Amino acid sequence: MSSERLIYLPLGGAGEIGMNAYVYGYGKPDQERLIVVDLGVTFPDMDGSPGVDLILPDITWLAERKDRIEAIFVTHAHEDHVGAIAHTYDQLGAPIYARAFTANIARRKMGEHGHDEEAVRVTGAWPEQVEVGPFKVGFLPMSHSIPESAALIIDSAHGRVIHSGDFKLDETPIVGEPFDPDLWAEVSKDGIKALVCDSTNVFSPNPGRSETSVGPEIEKLVRGHTDGIVVATTFASNVARVKTLADAGARAGRSIVLLGRAMRRMIEASIETGVLKDFPTVVSPEDARSIPRENLMLLVTGSQGERRAASAQLANGKYMGLELKEGDLFLFSSKTIPGNERGVIRIMNQLSEKGVDVVDDSSGLYHVSGHANGPDIARLHDIVNPQIVVPMHGEHRHLREHVKMAESAGRMGVLAVNGMMIDLSGNAPKVAEYIETGRTYLDGSVQIGALDGVVRDRIRMALNGHVLVTLILDEEDEPLGDPWCETMGLPDMGTSKAALVEVLEADISQFLGRADAKTLRDDDKLTEALRRIVRKSGQDEIGKKPEVTVVISRMH
Amino acid sequence: MSSERLIYLPLGGAGEIGMNAYVYGYGKPDQERLIVVDLGVTFPDMDGSPGVDLILPDITWLAERKDRIEAIFVTHAHEDHVGAIAHTYDQLGAPIYARAFTANIARRKMGEHGHDEEAVRVTGAWPEQVEVGPFKVGFLPMSHSIPESAALIIDSAHGRVIHSGDFKLDETPIVGEPFDPDLWAEVSKDGIKALVCDSTNVFSPNPGRSETSVGPEIEKLVRGHTDGIVVATTFASNVARVKTLADAGARAGRSIVLLGRAMRRMIEASIETGVLKDFPTVVSPEDARSIPRENLMLLVTGSQGERRAASAQLANGKYMGLELKEGDLFLFSSKTIPGNERGVIRIMNQLSEKGVDVVDDSSGLYHVSGHANGPDIARLHDIVNPQIVVPMHGEHRHLREHVKMAESAGRMGVLAVNGMMIDLSGNAPKVAEYIETGRTYLDGSVQIGALDGVVRDRIRMALNGHVLVTLILDEEDEPLGDPWCETMGLPDMGTSKAALVEVLEADISQFLGRADAKTLRDDDKLTEALRRIVRKSGQDEIGKKPEVTVVISRMH
């Protein structure tokens, strides 16, 4: 009962793509020493989280066990893996381990939030291991769409777990280490307890393609365009792609301009940490203005249609003194993440209005995914040959499909979603506990719970509009003057063709004329009655029941 | 100068996909007699139009010329072509012409809005022509993803225009008339002034596939699933698809259940108008409950993830007493329209949680588009051989590509977006005028202009929250009691760890204590000052500048 156990607990990333946060623990039940793997963010949207700036995992469970946390390990520098480290540092306070490139990015984040950058400790690649409490953890290089991505080898007295991180099987990734099947076989040869594994592309039926495969096509496209400016957008963190694009531009005699903060930051970090060599010379936007258009290539942020990024601004007008026009070419060397289609399409149409030719990845020529496809995942299963497959980094449907894949090959698979604590100690995984998890919103400068009702109220105002009722009552609880209504987000006029506020005020006045003393004395009753009247009048007049706020002032 | 001219004016659908509304006119400038082709809607979204029920074209220009409108022609019964007829009937009042199936749907809409159903006049197919003022108009049958879709042959003294409507080139469409190239060549043989042409799939590089091609695959899938219920969703208006699905189910020994209002309405209209024959017997949801799961097939609405449709409800829980579970199969026999991805993915994950296997169209096996692809569009150009190609039914990028396609084949093309009135009279098209156009929101029961500021205010409240400030001033313009703040959609507490409303009230009180008599006397000045204070305090406390409504009550 009281013997040590090895647990796995996803707090984010299992049942969604984004906001990764995985916990491993070893020790006696409820006394496990803990490590955290990745602390990422996900992004808000108008549908579910209007006005929110960032979405973080709910780390209440971890914060309550702060003294048991040995360390945080960050597999790579994508926002959905590293984005929350500075926002949660006050609550967790544990040292953060990462490889050099990831650490460079992580330290910038820590510094921006006034935290000690030295809390981020640079760690070498496998066979180096960090000993933290009952764990020994090593960073096993793995190809992905960002430099120095790594899987984690997590050793404890209950055996070895491999946490894949995000990965693809790319033996020629241009930047960063290639996937090395022999090394993976070597670390797995004594038996792997569990492979906790990326599920993103589990539904893609064909093996993934190498980053190298897009180079020749991009080069052909860039060379073929001899008129105006060539612009290309991709994920700034995809340093290999940025290099491929820049090299193609340079070889075609174009000067390279980097636009957008993330683009400059990523290239800077890559050069500082030595992962990127031989990047073509870059010219500033200012200098670019004096270079002929046909000798310019812009590499810009905003491939997902983000409103404030360089792509959107170039599509919308000028950016840093540069303006696109007829004869220019704009390449999306990226895939549109589901949910971002509208923003991307908006940019494409704005570019079309300017006469700019747009090339997207619908041909499959100019982008490859950073995640392993179905057959690649199966290949990794075969190489690692784990006792248990634990899918992560996926929505429910991805995790489920991944479990099916494992089981169809005769392996044990376990579908663990956020909050499901899995005991990996025995011969078969079992659910140890269900932890309450959720999302924390960074809203302006405040962190609020996703279920606090704040955002729900915003959504309600957006859907229904807002009516404010102000009523002053005298010492005898009699209305003093007329009630006053203000509306926000509602039509001025409804079916009766009178001003909506006047109709509402008349209906309230009529009610007040008839209301008994008991109601007028009781703020709650009166508020509820006025709210009901406004909602009913709203329904009659404009076919909508608005949100209502009632302010009652009593002159005593 | 004063001679007759032929004009084309898109008021919706040119520069967007949706909300189609095209005007043709013939006569002396500014005295043209007008016909309207299609009056459709588009759908709101949380990003741009929260709380809105439907989006209609802005028909101000037409309404101001009501006495010049001869007729409205509806090419087919998709919502983006027929959805606005009842909402605009009061303002336009013109007779509506449509073929039988379209008229059946249109009349239901008119009836629901209390309009005379007889305003919709059933018209036969070509060679029948309707004479309306200076125009003779005929419905030329054309294949699409709904029965009895038609192009319009629009004859005037300035020659023949063909308005393609929505189309694909399907010679075996299962339901509705096949595309008949000979008929199209025949009507075009004396020369076509302009082909006003669907651009939706202009970027699709391969010829489109016939509706017939999905039948065998669907049949194989349905036959192969022998466990539980089979559910399939598609656009209810795609009657051919619904029939294919139903036939596959019936042949596999399953009873067919139709779920969702649109599904029942479309099948009903198809049977009433004779376009659909031999539809398998349908059982009610009530009767379905006593049928074994492996003998049931549900055909359901909500392929686009609509929250209240049958698909969403089945994914979420029970619907009409039916509940899905492990062993069931759910087929999306549809494409997800860009922008709807999140809703569709939500359903897929909910189904996954229930253990339901989901099949989507990513394999291309279970859905074909209803629109002509690039090569099909080019083929129609060749058959019709028009003097001018006028792309419509597309975003700007589609229209631009379509013009390029026409020009690359040596034809004249003109990129006309909403509001651009084109004079088609001469040998080359020319822009006659720019008309102010836009969108009208149906919001509850009220129509409001998209730029009226109502929805903008809702979006602002959703992004920034809302603070209400109430202040009472006595006869001497001195504050009576303390100012009062209420918040909606904002965190309770900010960086100072005091209640946000208390911080706001304290800052306002402090200001009032120092304010001069002139400010306190002036409602506008005072309101502006209070708003500024609240926004600044908001920024300091919670990192957000809220929307502010100030209510000042004066006791005199």
Image (cartoon, coloured by chain):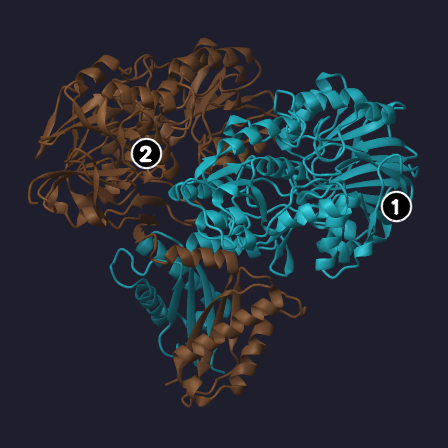
Chain colours: A cyan, B brown
Q: Going by the image, does A75 lie left or right of B472? A: right
- Visible in this render: residue B447? yes
Q: Quadrant of residue A214?
A: top right
Depth order, front residue of B375/B408 = B408
Q: Outermost residue toward the left?
A: B2
Front one among A426 and B293: A426
The residue under label 1 is which amino acid type?
Answer: Gln
- Which chain contains the residue that carries disc 1? A
Report the residue at 86% width, 49% height from top.
A68
Please give the chain letter of the residue carrying mark 2.
B
Instruction: Write the residue at 58% across / 50% down.
Output: A260
Question: Identity of the amino acid at label 2?
Answer: His
Q: Which percent across, then down, holds residue B378?
A: 32, 22
Label drawn at residue B393: 2
> Percent from the top left, x then y, of residue A311?
51, 46
Mark 2 → mark 1, Cα distance in angstroms: 64 Å
State whether residue B155 is above or below residue A484.
above
Say which residue appears at 17% left-offset and 18% top-offset. B189
Q: In which quarter of the image is residue B454?
A: bottom left
Q: Is residue B523 left or right of residue A427?
A: left
Q: What numbered label is drawn on residue B77?
A: none
Identify the secondary structure beneath mark 2.
Answer: loop
| Residue that carries the numbered disc 1 in the rendered image | A31
Say few, some or many: other residues with alpha carbon within 10 Å of mark 2 (under 14 / 14 to 19 / 20 or more): many
Circle 1 crowding by C-alpha within 10 Å: few under 14, some 14–19, many from 20: some
Q: Quadrant of the N terminus of chain A?
A: top right
B211 sits left or right of B22 in the view:
right
List x then y, in percent, for residue A381. Answer: 76, 22
Q: State the image coordinates of residue B73 (x, y, percent, origin top left).
A: 19, 33
Please tell me which residue lies in front, B184 or A72.
Answer: B184
Q: In this view, does B428 lie above or below A61?
A: above
